[in-house]
Amino acid sequence: MGDRINIDPISRIEGHLAIHLDIERGKVHHAECSGEMFRGFEMILKGRDPLDAQQITQRICGVCPASHGIASILAQDEAYGITPPTNGRLLRNIILGANFLQSHVTHFYQLSAMDFIDIAAVLSYNGSDKNMNQVKQWVASELKSNKIFPAAPFLPRYKGTYLKNVSAVSHYLEAFEMRQLLHQTGAEFGGKLPHIPVFVPGGVTSKITSNQIAACMSRFKTLKHFIEEAFYKDLIAVGKFFPEYFNIGKGQGNFLCYGVFKDSDDSKQTLFPSGVILGGKLEAFDPDQIVEDVSHSFYSSDSGGKPMEGKTIPEPKRENAYTWMKAPRYGGHVMEVGPLARVMVSYKKKYNENVNRMATRLMNDLNISLSDFDSVLGRHAARLIESHVLCERCMDWLSMLDPSKPVFTPFEVPDTCSGIGFTEAPRGALAHYLSIKNKRIDVYQCVVPTTWNCSPRDENGQPGALEKALEGTRIKDKDNPIEATRVVRSFDPCLACAVH
Ligand code: NFE
Ligand code: MG
């Protein structure tokens, strides 16, 4: 009989995720991911005015509201048969881009870095930075105290090996400033953050001034410097110190992305392309392959149906269920979504030379191969590649804005219509399915990135992507299962989104 490890909740992620691990001979034999709350947004939306949808769905999450807003207005653009003008498309990209970038920087530094970097390294700091000296004093006094829970969010932590790197600690503090800059950038054109008021079908309702363009350009330049001088260097330092984490946390190897950041007015080009990697083979994305299984989820709705016909009927005491997440599947397959999926698809398609150049640079600097990206540190590296490419392109989009041109295409809501908004959120492929009857929402279903990644088993017993990545992981000390939490955080789960 092996050991059972329950981590409930997992800290330093968004929302309430528990993982349950059965350990045999020191390795995870069986893993279950459990989303522990129910939200009911799909039920809240039914019967409402569809023009409220992009505001209501943004409240699914404070981390990636821009993605839900965009998914909703893309579904409505399709339903109403409209296309935004160039300015509208560019402003959507810039606002969404700023929201992606803040999520990636926050995920690496605030949510994940302390899995690898020893905060106590700050004790050797001898400079004059006020914030660093405050952290130093704080850590020193917490380590001296005998409190059971000292100095959250840094300590307590699982015992294990950590890298002592003072500059990474100072970048942890700078990352807060980057997050602020990026929220200011999103709010500059988005009105405010989180939960952006300017998103409408047909475009956006923002005004453009040359002062705003200049202010945002300067913020993206500051971020570009941070990505190169801090994010890149810290990721290389972690990668060189923990090379084994390019072998730990390997997923099942299937990747899905819908494509995001429309880069031409006819929508044919996107910054990150759509595509599927199944059994190592690149395929075109086919929207008809998506279904949602609820065999092990707390719902009594039919299992295995298409989202546009989907229902959300909660059944909290359902037998054999262990999570509030549904299990999306693609042609019956478990898929991983997220920055790693986007980078793998783009790289294999040779779609964007900046993606391939950055990936090659990382492979050279870390002495890894493409297949090593399917791992804990590979997922972090993919976020870095994406941040680099996206930050540069946001500056191009800013320079393409024309303050004299419209931002919005007028439209009418037909009595009966439907549309699907396929986009990507920081954590992966996101779709909103909308059907309207008598000008009111009849069906609203969201299929969300973390629902893909943290899904439970399906009717065929296939574990979800994170469950699969956990299985086989060696846990050296069952009282300090740091390997498991490093695997979980590499997926950047957001449970508020996942259970929506
Ligand atoms: Ni709440 Fe979200 C992203 C979406 S994750 S963070 O990114 O959609 O499932
Ligand atoms: Mg849903």
Image (cartoon, rainbow, N blue to C red):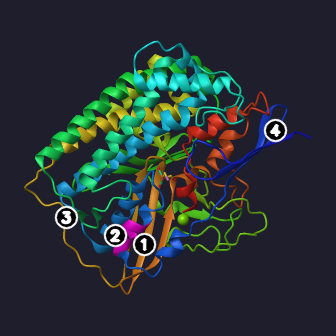
The mark nearer the N terminus, 4 or 2, is: 4
**The residue tagged with tag 1: helix, strand or loop?**
strand
Gap in angstroms between the C-alphas marked 4 and 2:
47 Å
Q: Are marks 2 and 1 in contact (CB under 8 Å)?
A: yes
> Residue shown at 47%/75% (left/top)?
45
| Mark 1 neighbour density, 10 Å: few (under 14) some (14–19) many (20 or more) | many
Task: Specify the amino acid type for callout 2.
Answer: Gln
Task: Specify the amino acid type for callout 4.
Answer: Ile
The mark nearer the N terminus, 2 or 1, is: 2
In the image, which disc is placed on residue 23? Answer: 4
Gap in angstroms between the C-alphas marked 2 and 1:
8 Å
Position in image of residue 250 (x %, y %): 62, 35
**The residue tagged with tag 4: helix, strand or loop?**
strand
The residue under label 3 is 408
Q: Are marks 3 and 2 in contact (CB under 8 Å)?
A: no
The residue under label 2 is 76
The residue under label 1 is 434
| The stretch drawn in magenta includes residue 233 | no
Q: Which is nearer the eye, 63 or 27? A: 63
> Residue shown at 48%/20% (left/top)?
236
Gap in angstroms between the C-alphas marked 3 and 2:
14 Å
Task: Specify the amino acid type for callout 1.
Answer: Leu
The mark nearer the N terminus, 1 or 3, is: 3
| The stretch drawn in magenta includes residue 53 | yes
Position in image of residue 20 (x %, y %): 75, 47
